[in-house]
Image (cartoon, rainbow, N blue to C red):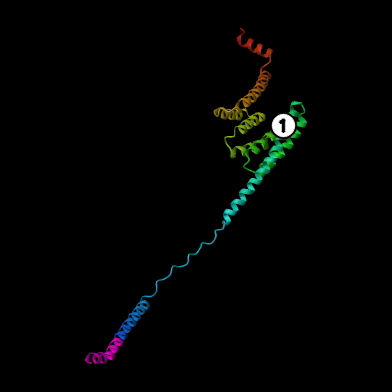
Amino acid sequence: MPGSNDRRSAGPAGQTLGAARGAALLAILASAVSLSSSLAAASGSAPSSPPRQQPPPTEPSSMTTDQATAEEQAKQARAEAEKSYSKGYAEVEEAKKELIAGKADAAKKKFGKALKKFQDAADRDETYYEAWNMVGYCARQTGDLKRAFAAYQRCLAINPEYEEAHEYLGEAYVQSGDLKKARQELAWLKSRDSDEAEELAESIEAAEAKNVPAAAEGAASNAPAGGSAASDSTGATGP
C-alpha cells in the first residue's frame, strides 16, 4: 500500500531530522552556557561586604584615672581635716570657759592645743579657709600676732569675702595698736552690712577710750609748771 510504504520510507528520515534538531538545540544551549561563563569570568564576581569589626573596648585614659585618684585623695584629706577642725573647735569652747572663769593661763594652754588642731586641718587641706581663720584666731589668743596675721591673710587669699576673717583681722590690728588698719577692716564690714561689724566697732571704741586718758596724761606731763606759766604771763603783761 502506498500509504504504508510512504510512512515506512519516511520513518528513518524523520528520526534523523529529529535527532539533528535535538543536536542543534544542545549546541545552542552549550554556547549560551559558555557565553555566560565567559562574561562572568570577564566581569568578576561582586565583592562581598567586609566583615563589620567591633571597636575595641574603650579604657579610661591615664589622665582620667589620675584625676579620679586625685579627687578621691582630696575628699579623704578634707574629711580628715574636718575631724581636726571639730577637735580644735571643741578646745576653743573649753578655752572660752576658762577665760570666763578668770583662768587665763589654762585658757591659753587650751588655745594652744586648739591651734595645733586647726593647723593640722589647714595642712591637710590648704584650701580650707575656715581652718586658716581659726589658726589666726588661736594664734592671736596665745599672743602670736605675727602668725595670726599670716593665717588671716592666707584665709582671705582663698576667700576674700569671708567676713569673720575680716573681723578677726581687725581685732588683731586693735591688739597690735594699729587702729587705722582696724578701722579699715571695720569700714569693709560696714560696706557689706555685716553683723561682724558691731563687735569690731566695740573693740575699736574700747581701745580709743584707753588711749584718750593716756594722751591726756602725756599732754599734762609736757605742759609747763604753773609758777613758770604765771611768771611768763606776768612778764609778758606787766608794766
Choose between 165 and 36: the one closer to the eye. Answer: 36
Q: Is residue 4 magenta?
A: yes
Choose between 164 and 14: the one closer to the eye. Answer: 14
Instruction: Give the percent coordinates (x, y) of residue 175.
Output: 67, 29
- Residue at 74% x, 28% y: name it: 99
Tell me how many marks there are. 1
What residue occupies the far top of the structure in this picture? Answer: 239
- Residue at 64% x, 48% y: name it: 73
For the record, the magenta segment spans: 1-20
Choose between 67 and 182: the one closer to the eye. Answer: 67
Query: Can residue 142 be seen at all in this image of the molecule?
Result: no
Task: Classify the position of the C terminus by image quarter.
Answer: top right
Task: Describe residue 101's horizontal placement relative to residue 82 as left or right.
Answer: right
From this view, report whether residue 60 is shown above or below residue 127.
Answer: below
Instruction: Give the percent coordinates (x, y) of residue 96.
Output: 72, 29
Q: Is residue 5 magenta?
A: yes
Task: Describe residue 34's horizontal placement relative to residue 84 as left or right.
Answer: left
Residue of label 1: 93
Instruction: Give the percent coordinates (x, y) of residue 94.
Output: 74, 32
From this view, report whether residue 82 is shown above or below residue 16.
Answer: above
- Residue at 34% x, 82% y: name it: 30
From this view, report whether residue 201 is shown above or below residue 16.
Answer: above
Query: Can residue 16 be seen at all in this image of the molecule?
Result: yes
Task: Classify the position of the N terminus by image quarter.
Answer: bottom left
The three-letter code of the residue at mark 1 reads: Glu
Res 154 → quadrant:
top right
* Mark 1 crowd level (few <14, some 14–19, many ≥20, 10 Å Cα): some
- Residue at 29% x, 89% y: name it: 16
Q: Main secondary structure of the magenta part?
A: helix
Secondary structure of the residue carrying tag 1 is: helix
Res 123 → quadrant:
top right
Instruction: Give the percent coordinates (x, y) of residue 5.
Output: 24, 92
